[in-house]
Amino acid sequence: MHPALPRVRRSEIGKPQRPMRVPKAAELLASQIRRQIILGQLEEGEVLLPEAKLIKQSGVSRPTLREAFRILESEAFIAVNRGSRGGARILAPNVDIAARYAGIYLQHANTTFEDVPMVRAFLEPPAARTLAERSDPRMIQELRDHIAIEEQNVDDVRAFAQLSAQFHDLVMELAGNKTLALLVAMLSRVVEKYSTRVLEPVLDVDETERTLQSHRRLVDLIEAGDGEEALSHWREHGEAIAQAQLKALGGDDFLDVVD
């Protein structure tokens, strides 16, 4: 028997087909280098071969190589230093790049600031429950080590704000869901970008103390293995942060994150 042929819709019969676009040599070379970076075959900080050697190795012209470099540089996969000691240095994929494009997209879509912290407050609590259900001593110690650094900076409200954001990222990272961790880290950076762009937020030492106590409470619940209480506590904590940010920054205002 002959294999069945794909069915063609009547509306497609006689319809001119869009010609296939053949990638340029520069795009193919950029794709090859990009794949090596993503797969870890080229590591962050590593410098690519000199231009002359890359041209010989890849069989492309100098303009083609430089066009490939421009593509990769625009995507933040490499940083090119010009001059006699120049070269292309590898950059690893970075959440800040993803956050930048996410922020631009949200601003283009006329998103109000209120959307962002409320989504974070929704996404983070399940990670706290996951950590409590595991109650892994290594992870608990990592969280406590971070809290120790927070304690040293509790009177420096700006340093503490950064450490607090890092604590939230750490909770997501340790929970093990890389997709959720990425989403929360992106949203955290969008909030940070917006807050520094529209005004200097009013911070308060009393608030840092309350936040520190809340972080300690979460780790205690994780250590006790109380998943539901950890979920509830982190939800209340996230909602309180979201409300404080909305009050300080204005939830009805449209996002503005573009430099």
Image: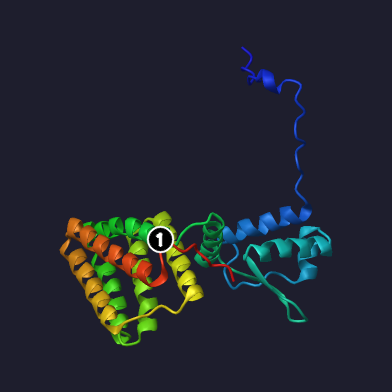
242 lies left or right of 188: left
Q: Residue at x 31, y 81 (%)?
A: 150
Q: Is residue 61 visible?
A: yes
Q: Amino acid at mark 1?
A: Glu
Q: Secondary structure at mark 1?
A: loop
Residue 69: image location, x then y, percent: 72, 65
Residue 45: image location, x then y, percent: 59, 73
Q: Residue at x 31, y 82 (%)?
A: 204
Residue 176: image location, x then y, percent: 35, 58
Q: Residue furthest top?
A: 1
User: Which is more toward the observer, 111 or 147?
Assistant: 111
Q: Quick one: quadrant of the N terminus?
A: top right
In the rendered image of this protein, does residue 13 appear above or below residue 98? above
Q: Where does label 1 land, which residue?
A: 114
Q: Residue at x 33, y 60 (%)?
A: 121
User: Counting other residues with Cα less than 10 Å from the Cα at mark 1, is it few (<14), some (14-19), or many (20 or more)?
Assistant: many
Residue 101: image location, x then y, percent: 56, 60
Q: Quick one: quadrant of the C terminus?
A: bottom right
56 lies left or right of 120: right
Q: Quadrant of residue 184?
A: bottom left
